[in-house]
Image (cartoon, helix red, strand yellow):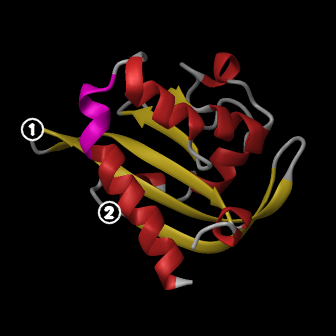
Amino acid sequence: MSANLDRLEELAMSLVHTLPSWRPSGLADLVIANLPDGIAVIDDATRYTLWNPQMAALTGESAADMLGTAVGQRTCLVDGLFGGVLPATFRGEKIAHRDVSYTGRKTHGRCDTLAWPLWRDGQVVGALLLVRPLSVYAGAG
């Protein structure tokens, strides 16, 4: 299981370096949209600023409904998975949980989660939230 979480952390590290310059177009957009992981980004006001299609599929919440919404403003799977760890993430801590049960509006299962602080000029300015269903690992070699 540790190797699986290591893969998720490698993805997070790659995304953390990409997101500060990411714009919703081009190759980066295609990569983020087509990853098997649910990806959300929140800003320093804890508003969702990125919500990829897999996160929408896992939660049953569309990007249109979630973008600009503050964490806790809507009852959402992501709030339940990450709400308790966000204070630590905004203090700069990376928080990972393995084999967590989740229930979205239309889906349920088990997943690994990772909350990763986003830094700019020595300050945490947001958080990258990743949800990887354990079923994704079944296809990984």
Residue 18 at x, y = what percent? 28, 38
Which residue is depicted at the point 45% across and 56% down? 115
* Residue placed most toward the observer, 89 or 24: 24
Can you tell which mark lies on residue 84? none
Which residue does the numbered mark 2 point to in the structure image?
93
Residue 122 at x, y = what percent? 10, 45
**Displayed quadrant of residue 98:** bottom right
Which residue is depicted at the point 9% across and 38% down? 121
Q: Residue furthest right?
A: 106
Query: For the residue marked with disc 1, what is the amino acid?
Result: Asp
- Element carrying mark 2: loop
* Residue placed most toward the observer, 91 or 5: 5
Residue 114, placed above or below residue 73: below
**Displayed quadrant of residue 134:** bottom right
Q: Which residues are magenta?
A: 17-22
> Is 101 on the left or on the right of 23, as rendered?
right
Query: For the residue marked with disc 2, what is the amino acid?
Result: Glu
Residue 136 at x, y = what percent? 67, 62
Which residue is depicted at the point 58% across and 37% down? 34
Q: Quadrant of the C terminus?
A: bottom right
State yes or no: discs 2 and 1 in contact (Cβ < 8 Å). no
> Is 9 on the left or on the right of 131, as rendered?
left
Residue 60 at x, y = what percent? 80, 35
Q: Residue furthest left?
A: 121
Which residue is depicted at the point 76% across and 38% down? 57
* Residue placed most toward the observer, 123 or 64: 64
> Is 21 on the left or on the right of 41, as rendered?
left
Which residue does the numbered mark 1 point to in the structure image?
121
